[in-house]
Amino acid sequence: MGGLVGWVDFSADLEERREILDRMTGTMRDRGPDSGGTWISRSAGLGRRALFTGKARGSGAPARVKTSAGEVVAVLTGELHEPSEPGAGDPAEALIHAYLRWGPAFVERMSGAFGFALWDGRERRLVLGRDRMGVKPLYYHAYRDGILFASEPKGIMAHPRFKARLDLSKLPIVLQPRLALPGETPLAGLHEVPPAHLLVFTEEGLTARRYWRLTSAPHEDSFDKTARRVRELLEDAVARQVTADAPMGAMLSGGVDSTSVAALSARLLAPDAKLRTFCLRFAGDTEHFTASELRPDIDAPFAEAAAAELGTDHTTLTASVADLLATVPATRTARDLPGWGQFDASMRLLFQHMSATCRVVMTGEAADEVFGGYPYFFRRDVLDKDGFPWMFGGPKLVDHLAPDLAAELDPAADERARYETLLARVPRLPGEDPAEARIRELFFFGLSGPLSVILDRKERMSASLGLDVRVPFCDHRLVEYVWNVPWSMKSAGGVKGLLKAAMADVLPAAVANRRKSAYPHVQNPDYDRTLLAEASWIVNDPGSPLRHLFDTARMNDLIQRITAGRMNDELPGGSNPAALLIQLVEMRHWVEDYQVEIPA
């Protein structure tokens, strides 16, 4: 874990501007509280802050290997499971040796969740790489003769060359982040290295190469053999990520995904060690919770029952509305980009509690995207519609833009273009049944925008507390295998039936039979009133930085309908109508906190 930054410029002497690199590196201190260091030459500089998750300790500085032709330097974040090079105790040093042996193609031999930067002084070449599923972040800003890069936008924002300016054409992904294509951000000139990509920067310019992608092929295994293989792959993924010499914890919601990971993790600890598990609930749930399609029940009782059967050391954290509102500012600092309000805050509160006793935490996220856990997979009316399955029904913030801006951006056409872009990327299986092909499309969509939203929240909130959260369901070998399992097998016996079959001997009956329940959100009128009041100010006050972007009358009508409770049946899955305003409120604070310029 930790954070990296860097700067390459072929037209300047960076050694004379070391203080800028030091400032960039300092922004990663929360991600890497234990140690850090920098390396700089005339044309390139790298910085790293480290979080140590085991007994091994190092300097935290960039790894360096000298050759007869020049020096190769690298910084790495995340977990690198392969390759293993003799004599290379530092994973970043192992990375360099792999690069020296295989060149840039070495990344295809790597496994794990990682982001890295490597400077080849022999070739005057920078190589940036990101893991296959995009678990670990890596951003960059390229300019003539140079490039800035960092694990988080704040590392790039610390450089005087970069100015935060909204790319107005990206406003739709600010108001609905699940529409973002891999690599997109709403800031002009700021990009994220897409998952499974390698970027190379030389004096000739910047090139990008995708080094891994899903491929579609017929699935020949029986259901029983498939379930056994899923179990083997998940067990191996968990074993690779459990750290025996660091305090271990796990998120435990009492659902199939988190319980599966917690159960496998607990088995790998020493006989005298207990896995610490944690669950979140909200004060006022007894009074305000209303069951819905997405959240049919409260997690805590199921988590407590699962923990008792697994024998873990379990804690349930209760969060109030006041706790959430007090935590939201810290979530904005953790993200640098517009966030998710209470959803970020509740997760950060849980991670904050976990960080007091844990360094490494396991989580069951991504199982819904890999195995098909969302209600829309089972709804024929949604499957038959030509578009993103999570975008049907109810109003959208982009429908309330100022008329001139709406005409310029054409949000409907923008959404359609994004849909068609991803549709063209779906790995096809020739001759596949049309119904199965449509399900394959939905899986591909979910593994793109929505999964990145989930992973980003988990990563930013944990990293801001110096906590290393790991996601075994993102192991690319498991994803590759399950990708080609037909829907009839994945869903045999109900939602995520294949996963339940694979984990049948470790799942408590109450967990195995529980209905799918999404990540919890607070249901409390006090929180809703806070959102409504702030949204009203944003839309109406002359001092609001966003007022000119929206149609005031239409936005006021939306706010009034939410306030009056007239929208409770208009959103799919029983979603809370007030939550529609979260992106509006968070955009306002992002613009103000980061002094983001908005084009007139």
Image: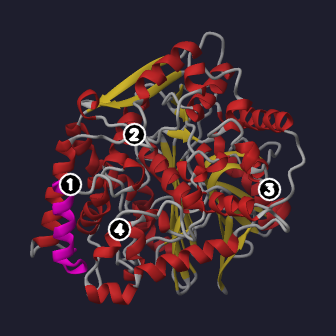
Mark 3: secondary structure: helix
- Report the Cα–Cα distance between label 3 and label 1: 51 Å
Let me know if residue 215 appears in the view.
yes
Dot 3 or dot 2, earlier in sequence: 3
Question: Which numbered circle lies on residue 396?
Answer: 4
Q: What is the CA distance from the residue labelled 2 to the residue labelled 1?
A: 18 Å
In the rendered image, which residue does mark 2 sit on? 520
Mark identifier at residue 531? 1
Q: Position of residue 554 (x, y in %)?
A: 21, 74
Q: Nearer the viewer, mark 3 or mark 1?
A: 1
86 displayed left or right of 513: right
Q: CA distance from mark 3 to mark 4?
A: 48 Å
Helix or strand or loop: what does disc 4 sit on? loop
Counting from the top left corner in percent of width and height, residue 315 is at 41, 21
Depth order, front residue of 339/117? 339
Q: For the magenta stretch, what is the residue range?
A: 546-564
Answer few, some or many: residues within 10 Å of disc 1's Cα (few below 14, many 20 plus, some between 14 and 19).
many
Residue identified by numbered label 3: 98
Report the residue at 33% width, 66% height from top: 395
Mark 1 and mark 4 in contact (Cβ < 8 Å)?
Answer: no
Which sits earlier in the primary sequence, circle 3 or circle 1? 3
What's under tag 3, amino acid-wise?
Answer: Ala
